[in-house]
Amino acid sequence: LNLETYSEPDDLYRARADEVNPNRPLFTGDIFDDVPIPGAQEHGMALVLAHPCSFRIGAGRLADRVLVAAVREISKQGRKAWTRGLLDRMPLPDLAGTGMWAAFLEETGRAYVEHLLDACRLACLSESAVNMLQQRLTCHLTRVEVPTHQFSQAFSHTYEEADLLEDWTDMLTEADERLQPGEPWLPWVDVPHVLYRGTIPLTCSGAISLRVKIGPCLQTGNSGARLGARHAAADIGIAMMLGLPGAAGA
Amino acid sequence: MDDALRFPGSSTNASADVQLGPGLQLTKTMTIEERARDLTELAGSLRNRTAITTEDIADVHHRSFRLQLDTHTAELVKRDPVQLLDEVAGLGFAWRDIARMIGVSVPALRRWRLGEKPSGDNRRAIARLLAFTHIITDQVFEPASWMEVPITGDAPTTAIDLYAAGHLDVAFDLATGNCTPEAVLDIVEPGWRDQHRSDWEVATAEDGQPYIKPKNVR
């Protein structure tokens, strides 16, 4: 066995603590502070194990329950210890301050999404860490070692989707903040799985679907489609700021 | 054979001067083996000189590239860093890739976009990334798209990886066609063939989603 490990703890995290963007959609590798896991724990930290496709059930909505693993503080382990052993765990060094934590891949269960939404998101794993998580989970369950770069290849469209949704929501919440009281805004229709809880005027004429806009990018992952999604969000934001008819509705 | 030394088995007229002492020189007829050895040495010498010349030219090319990069960076760094970031993003890069190439976190980029000021070093890093894309624009169509594609089908390494690891010269060589992808990988990832060898591949399932399967299995 020669499983992937990390060079520095920071490599494993896209964001921690107050750096976590509430506009980022729920994603594999997100870690929450206090989530009951049926059959595993009543309280404690939990890491989302499930593939995004399994908990998004269409039109941006989330499934009622999501597969998660319990996370606990453990004794210190060197980074090389994870290449050949500790297969039942995902290393999470310096997750919540200095120290060593791990997600226990045997202590899993289907947590209720409402509990995730009520909890505080402590961290989002980086792309390389999600690949590591997939590799460790696969190896632990099946004794098959798949290179992380192949998980990356198979997962790339989901990273892209999450990034675009975050980007899109950032742009539109920014535009929303510029609206004056009494100005029309549109209801949030497509991304309830984003953990932002405020009002977001998200559609133009109520007909624009994020999926439609970012769909080509999800298929190809190319920069041109990424730009298309950004421009679409910008256009809606501008329309909202100018109070154009297409942006009004609710 | 009054002025030449001939050796048994010699079948050529090739000869070489043999200095016996002051004012005394004999011409020696060379054997095929000796001639071949001399030619090999000559060819080796020429190749070494060519290699040294090639290295020298590459060095000059890299120095001129760095000068161009530094000069352009110095111009760009005078501008608003958020505007520069937007221009980089406007090329189509993902924020996570921009963050890697600048050497900061994605949340740091977000904070800058929301108004926090980047440090001087980071401001320069943003300008340098934009300058790099401007320089290679003459060589590659849509730099962002080119940089996120693996440089060869045999490894997942991209030009973004090269840039993020600080191999700007190598990324430039690749963009300008002065280095093959394999040679690039030999430089930056010795042992890459073994490292990236895999019995698995990614395919598309009936539902249109990618999945991982063993190679050569239908």
Image (cartoon, coloured by chain):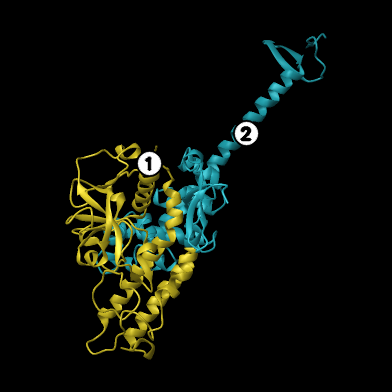
Q: Compared to A235, does A68 lie above or below? A: above
Q: Which chain is yellow?
A: A
Q: Is residue A7 visible?
A: yes
Q: Secondary structure at mark 2?
A: helix
Q: Colour of chain B?
A: cyan
* Amino acid type indicated by mark 2: Arg
Residue B213 image position (x, y, % from top left): 50, 50
Q: Secondary structure at mark 1?
A: loop
Does B132 sit left or right of A22 as displayed? right
Task: Kindly report the distance in space between the C-alpha atoms of the residues bearing marks 2 and 1.
Answer: 43 Å
Q: Quadrant of residue A214?
A: bottom left
Q: Chain of mark 2?
A: B
Q: Position of residue B45 (x, y in %)?
A: 62, 29
Dot 2, crowdedness within 10 Å: few (<14), some or many (≥20)? few
Q: What amino acid is found at the position of numbered circle 1 in the picture?
A: Leu
Instruction: Tell me whether marks 2 and 1 sit on the same chain.
Output: no
Quadrant of the image containing the N terminus of chain A = top left
Observer-side mark, 2 or 1, equals: 1
User: Around disc 1, counting alpha carbons within 10 Å, would you say few (fewer than 14), some (14 to 19), or many (20 or more)?
Assistant: some
**Subunit bearing disc 1:** A
Q: In the rendered image, which residue does mark 2 sit on?
A: B47
Residue beneath the point at 35% across and 53% down = A130
Residue A101 relative to residue A208: left or right: left
User: Whole-percent x and y of residue B81?
Assistant: 32, 65
The percent position of residue A243, horizontal first and vertical second, equals 33, 89
Residue at the image point whose x is 37% and y is 46% from the top: A141
- Tag of residue B63: none
Horizontal side of A163 relative to B208 (left or right) equals left
Picture quarter containing residue A80?
A: top left
Q: Which residue is mark 1?
A: A3
